[in-house]
Amino acid sequence: MATTQDGAYDLQVANPGVTAVRKTGAIFFLPTDADWVRAGHHDPSTGGDWLYPTRSNTPPTMALANPTTGCVSNPGVNVANYGNGADWNGQDGNVTCVGSCGPLSASAYGTFDQGGNVSEWTEGLSGSLRIARGGSFLDASTALRSDTPEIKDFFVEQNKQGFRIARRSSCLDVNLDGEPDRPGEVQGFAMIKSPTTTLSWSPELLSTQYDIAGGSLTALQTTGVIGATCLVSPNGNDLTATSYTDERPNPAPYEGYYYMVRGQNACGSGPYGFATGGLWRLPSAGCP
């Protein structure tokens, strides 16, 4: 046996840092530059891209660190570890616990720390140089932007430099739109009241589980579906059946509830139906 392992790249080439090619059938590898940017900056709910990989077009709040654990002490909306703000372990700026900026600072695809912490190598090339993305714990906020890739020699070693492993998707993309085939709109919705409210719907072909969002009809009239809250979610209570019983007390006289059902699979979520303008309904306080 000539080697002890067989990786994702053919390294038996001259100058492998530039010319190494990913092998056919590789399962784990560095993302391409385009894949990295899509995972970090794209938002499938709008079809557009965010400037920062925290679902924001404004610079993130600078992360602070717990001096004992090194985890981010101020997680929340649009937070990232950059600018030497996370001081701990005797250092002026340092890496922090993976994902500790919190889910509200994750990308639209649910990836953590694509902005800050460490700058990440991609497969992307710029001439004879490699493309890195995302900025790091010691960079300025501009390094986190989608329009400021870092171009440098592949052999550079820095404490701010790391990488993210991608894997081949098992999700189909039949229509070749670059998106995995997520579930479609749930059909056949019905509601029976006797005495509790039982909801049912037809099985959605690509769905393996479902979640339900809803709210009061009064709130629907004033704010629309933006006022919806999560009633049941695969993240907290897997719902694999195509029915659900709402055990809440009856609404007040002349009041009522509305419900929306969404299918999910390992590749993503379907819509809660489509609004009249053709866009997905996406309640701001709906199920994750």
Image (cartoon, rainbow, N blue to C red):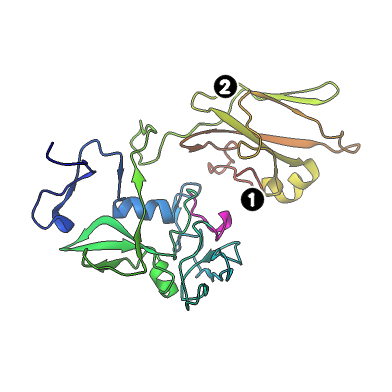
Question: Label 1 belongs to which residue?
Answer: 284
Examine the residues drawn in magenta and state their main secondary structure: loop
Decide which of tag 2 and tag 1 comes sooner along the chain: 2
Q: Position of residue 237 (x, y in %)?
A: 66, 35
Judged from the image, the secondary structure of the residue bearing numbered disc 1 is loop
Q: Is residue 51 above or below residue 224?
A: below
Judged from the image, the secondary structure of the residue bearing numbered disc 2 is loop
Q: Going by the picture, which residue comes out furthest to the left? A: 14
Density class for disc 2 (Cα within 10 Å; few <14, some 14-19, many ≥20) is: some
Measure the C-alpha gap from mark 2 to mark 1. Answer: 25 Å
Q: Quadrant of the C terminus?
A: top right
- Towards the viewer: 84 or 70: 70
Q: Is residue 179 left or right of residue 192?
A: left
Q: Quadrant of the N terminus?
A: top left
Report the disc number at residue 203.
2
Q: Is residue 99 left or right of residue 175?
A: right
Is residue 22 covered in magenta? no
- Towards the viewer: 232 or 154: 154
Q: Is residue 108 above or below residue 247?
A: below
- Towards the viewer: 278 or 207: 207
Read off the magenta span.
100-108
Determine the residue positioned at 32% across, 65% down. 149
